[in-house]
Amino acid sequence: MKLSFRACSHEDDFWHARNFLREIFLLNGRLEHSWNVARLDYWRWHYIKTCNILESVEKGMTLWENTDGKIIAALTHIGGSELRLHVHPHYRSAELENEILTYAEENFYAVTEDGRRYIYMPIFEDDTQRQETAQNRGYEKQFGWGHHYRRNLDSPIPDTPIPSGYAIRSMGDAKEYPARSWASWRAFHNDEPDENYDGDYSWYANLQSAPLYRRDLDVIAVASDESIASFCTIFYDDYTRSAVTVLVGTAAEHWRRGLGKAVITEGLRRLKDMGCTLVFSTAHEEPADFLYRSVMQDMKVTDTWLKVIK
């Protein structure tokens, strides 16, 4: 089959690619062999728009199409030198993935301080085809893992007690942006001095502009003084009836009180009421891993595969 590739060069390309991810996610049995569309939204409206890891969508996505203009595969550049491959399962082959990786190694690499180019990607531990392709191209498995959790919402959701002195509710309006931003800082930068916090909460408005954002799925726990103690922001795609917890955290002064589990569990209940049947969470470090293990049911592991380009 003859394929051509091109950068995602205009707005329509992005939305076609977005629908492509929905299509192949279903064809893959709703396993994350390709991105859930929620992850694409988070990539564009948070990683690119807020974190500025790339200049634009056009700089980070390449499409492979057949002669009819149908998308067969997409390559996403996360930023730095990290990749994600999304391939239609009916057309997947070592030949196609070799072509995609050749392009990636020429265009999406990063450079070490001593001038060496490198590139890397996660590969599921049971994906022997991609492992073999990567290994044949000189990639090596590194120390570093991703735990990809999922929970089927057809099963009962366990009751989770809300700690005394806290209440759980949906995120409020724009007046709560500063408090929400501060809670994120205290959750993810608790080892830094407070003066490092720049007070800029525009990132949160960017997140809310993502197509899958819903305030009723932006669950927070508030303390008695109405400060935000914990949060769970979920993107739900009703086309695939699946969701991803894109941001979960608890401010350091409220750790170890069960708040993270409480806000996630409340989010699961709300999702189930909306018709969602499957939820995903991903952990790359121990605290998140412990939390998701306590509420999710199944887990798949990715290893990090790195190539240093000569």
Image: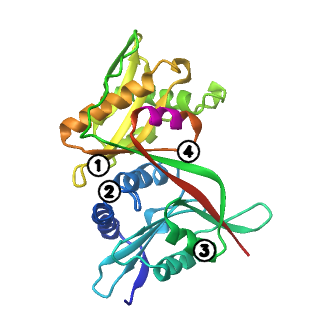
> On residue 30, which mark appears?
2
Q: Name the N-terminal-most of marks 4 and 1.
A: 1
Q: Name the N-terminal-most of marks 2 and 1.
A: 2
**Displayed quadrant of residue 166:** top left
For disc 1, the marked residue is 242
Amino acid under disc 1:
Ser
For disc 3, the marked residue is 105
Amino acid under disc 2:
Arg
For disc 4, the marked residue is 284
* Alpha carbons under labels 3 and 2: distance apart: 28 Å
In the drawing, does residue 259 fall left or right of residue 117?
A: left
Marks 3,2: beta carbons within 8 A: no
Question: Does the segment drawn in magenta span residue 289?
Answer: yes
Q: Name the N-terminal-most of marks 4 and 3.
A: 3
What count of labels does the image hold? 4
Q: Residue at x 29, y 79 (%)?
A: 70
Q: Residues within 10 Å of mark 2 (few under 14, many from 20)?
A: some
* Alpha carbons under labels 2 and 4: distance apart: 21 Å
